[in-house]
Image (spheres, rainbow, N blue to C red):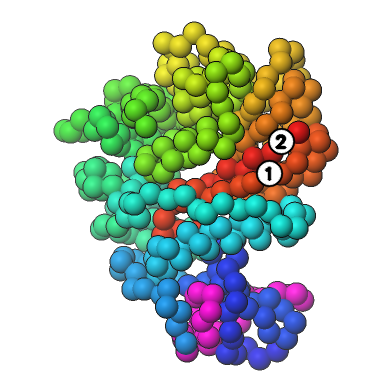
């Protein structure tokens, strides 16, 4: 097989690369688009597939646009992969990727995929991001590497987060990462540090910001102020702490919450289980519309946040512990469920135990469509059938998205 070749690209893969065929192999090409004819150089060759570097775009797609960030590209920042693609095409490609994953990995022949749901904020949407030391300043990891590129600006950062980044743009020996977050509703700021050896740094700041140390064992040490902030999403106030995963795109998270409630079909009189409930994103929202919500979460900081945010409600019950173990012990019947598993998947017999409790309809929220696709076998084993799925464009300018998939018995 020649090292350099001209290639017609026909599809898009999970991971953001465009793909084509040559000599019986599938060729993956980053920073290219379906429909383009390109010249590439092979960089990694296997029996059935290969990866190639884009050398030249011979026939560009009408969906190709000029990237907005000078750091974008194969030698630059790895945070965005799709700044060269028009927004409408991005949302279409995400639906295509979802369909492909469900067909190839999930074994579904013709899955019903709804149009991708997205906000009208494709830029300046991130209110949380992790930065890494780049010498004496902070930066972002390069494409496909742990090397860090110093940056002076980023077009997907919310203006308030970019201001915090500029105020906090300093690194020191022993710093591993800085997780910066701002509240779009209150203006509160949080910096969660990770250090080599979990060493607590001596820090003085002359602007209002909470600072916490996230240790390697998952525990959190407050250094300045309280290690949390408050955010309003779709009219509901949540507490988000260091030590737990926090939403970074607030308008898109509001769409995600509404999508789950809509497709799940919630209503008065229902009992709902929220498995891997996190800080209670769905727990709090669903509690307004049903009779009972039972939340299950293992992360102690997340469950504390959920308990605080839902503390005014008398129809929320929270269980702390690994969901697979907690579900085995529960006996009260439920009607509906939401599951938001980690990338490792649902966990042992989670679907079977939800079925045992009487769950007739379930919303599976996946941050990786491959995780969802792999878990379809477990859903089938519990006699759940796939109904429909939709991608929510949680991260414009990247190939990342969150899926809401509905299953029923």
State the predominant SS element of the stretch in magenta. strand
Residue 59, position in %: x, y?
A: 47, 87
Above or below, comparing residue 264 to residue 26 in the picture: above
Residue 355, position in %: x, y?
A: 76, 27
Residue 381 in view: yes
Q: Give the CA separation, mark 1 to mark 2.
A: 7 Å
54 or 145, nearer to the observer? 54
Above or below, comparing residue 80 to residue 286 in the picture: below
Residue drawn at x 66%, y 61% is: 100
Q: Label 2, on which residue?
A: 408
Query: Within the magenta stretch, is there residue 353?
Result: no
SS under mark 2:
strand
Residue drawn at x 28%, y 36% is: 184
Q: Label 1, on which residue?
A: 387
Residue at far top of view? 314
Q: Quadrant of the N terminus?
A: bottom right
Residue drawn at x 34%, y 28% is: 235
């Amino acid at each position: 097989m020649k090292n350099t070749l001209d290639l017609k690209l026909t599809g898009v893969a999970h991971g953001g690369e465009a793909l084509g065929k040559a000599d019986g192999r599938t060729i993956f090409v980053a920073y290219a688009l379906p429909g383009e004819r390109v010249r590439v150089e092979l960089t990694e060759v296997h029996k059935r597939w290969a990866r190639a570097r884009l050398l030249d775009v011979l026939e560009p797609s009408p969906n190709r646009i000029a990237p907005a960030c000078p750091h974008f590209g194969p030698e630059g920042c790895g945070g965005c992969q799709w700044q060269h693609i028009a927004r409408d095409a991005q949302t279409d490609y995400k639906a295509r990727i979802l369909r492909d994953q469900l067909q190839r990995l999930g074994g579904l022949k013709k899955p019903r995929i709804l149009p991708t749901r997205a906000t009208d904020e494709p830029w300046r949407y991130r209110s949380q991001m992790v930065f890494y030391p780049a010498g004496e300043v902070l930066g972002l990891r390069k494409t496909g590497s742990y090397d860090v590129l110093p940056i002076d600006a980023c077009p997907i950062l919310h203006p308030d987060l970019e201001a915090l980044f500029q105020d906090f743009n300093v690194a020191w020996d022993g710093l591993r990462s800085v997780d910066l977050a701002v509240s779009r509703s209150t203006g509160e700021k949080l910096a969660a540090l990770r250090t080599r050896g979990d060493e607590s740094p001596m820090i003085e700041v002359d602007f209002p910001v909470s600072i916490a140390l996230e240790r390697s064992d998952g525990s959190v040490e407050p250094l300045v102020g309280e290690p949390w902030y408050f955010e309003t999403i779709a009219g509901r106030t949540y507490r988000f702490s260091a030590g737990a995963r926090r939403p970074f795109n607030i308008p898109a998270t509001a769409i995600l919450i509404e999508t789950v409630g809509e497709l799940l079909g919630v209503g008065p009189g229902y009992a709902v289980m929220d498995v891997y409930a996190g800080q209670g994103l769905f727990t709090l929202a669903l509690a307004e519309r049903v009779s009972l919500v039972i939340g299950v979460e293992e992360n102690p900081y997340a469950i504390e946040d959920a308990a605080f945010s839902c503390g005014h409600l008398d129809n929320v019950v929270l269980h702390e512990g690994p969901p697979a173990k907690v579900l085995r012990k529960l006996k009260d019947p439920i009607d509906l469920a939401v599951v938001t598993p980690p990338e490792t998947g649902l966990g042992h017999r989670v679907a079977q135990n939800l079925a045992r409790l009487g769950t007739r309809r379930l919303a599976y929220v996946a941050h990786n469509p491959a995780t969802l696709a792999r878990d379809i076998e477990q859903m089938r084993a519990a006699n759940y059938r796939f109904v429909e799925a939709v991608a929510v464009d949680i991260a414009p300018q990247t190939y990342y998205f969150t899926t809401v998939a509905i299953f029923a018995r």
